[in-house]
Amino acid sequence: MSDIPTYLRWLCGLCLLMGTFGFVLLAAGFREPSFGKVATVVVLYVAAVVLFVLYRHFATKKG
């Protein structure tokens, strides 16, 4: 049970890293923005927030 916060923290970091990479590609003009590409970046950031909230929940849970 104690490994769950660690996994959630790593997944949150990976989602942030991939979302930032996708955002940089779109912002720098290496890729043409389309609905699918923008939606992927947004979903990655939303997943990172959800994973962080779950991490905080499990990390501060007593017993």
Image (cartoon, grey):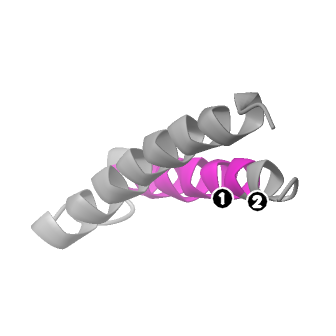
The rendered magenta stretch, by its main secondary structure, is classed as helix
Graded by Cα atoms within 10 Å as few (under 14), some (14 to 19) or many (20 or more), the crowding at tag 2 reads few
Find residue 7 and name its label.
Answer: 2
User: To which residue does mark 1 refer?
Assistant: 11
Q: Is residue 39 magenta?
A: no
> Quarter of the image holding residue 7?
bottom right
Q: Residue at x 39, y 62 (%)?
A: 30
Could you tell me residue 37's position as x and y percent?
26, 67
* Residue 33: image location, x then y, percent: 20, 60
Q: Secondary structure at mark 2?
A: helix
Image quadrant occupied by the C terminus: top right
| Residue at the image position 76 percent from the left and 57 percent from the top | 4
**Residue 13 visible (yes or no):** yes
Q: Nearer the viewer, residue 18 or 11?
A: 11
Q: Amino acid at mark 2?
A: Tyr
Residue 28 visible, this orientation: no
Magenta segment range?
8-26
Instruction: Return the residue found at the far bottom.
Output: 36
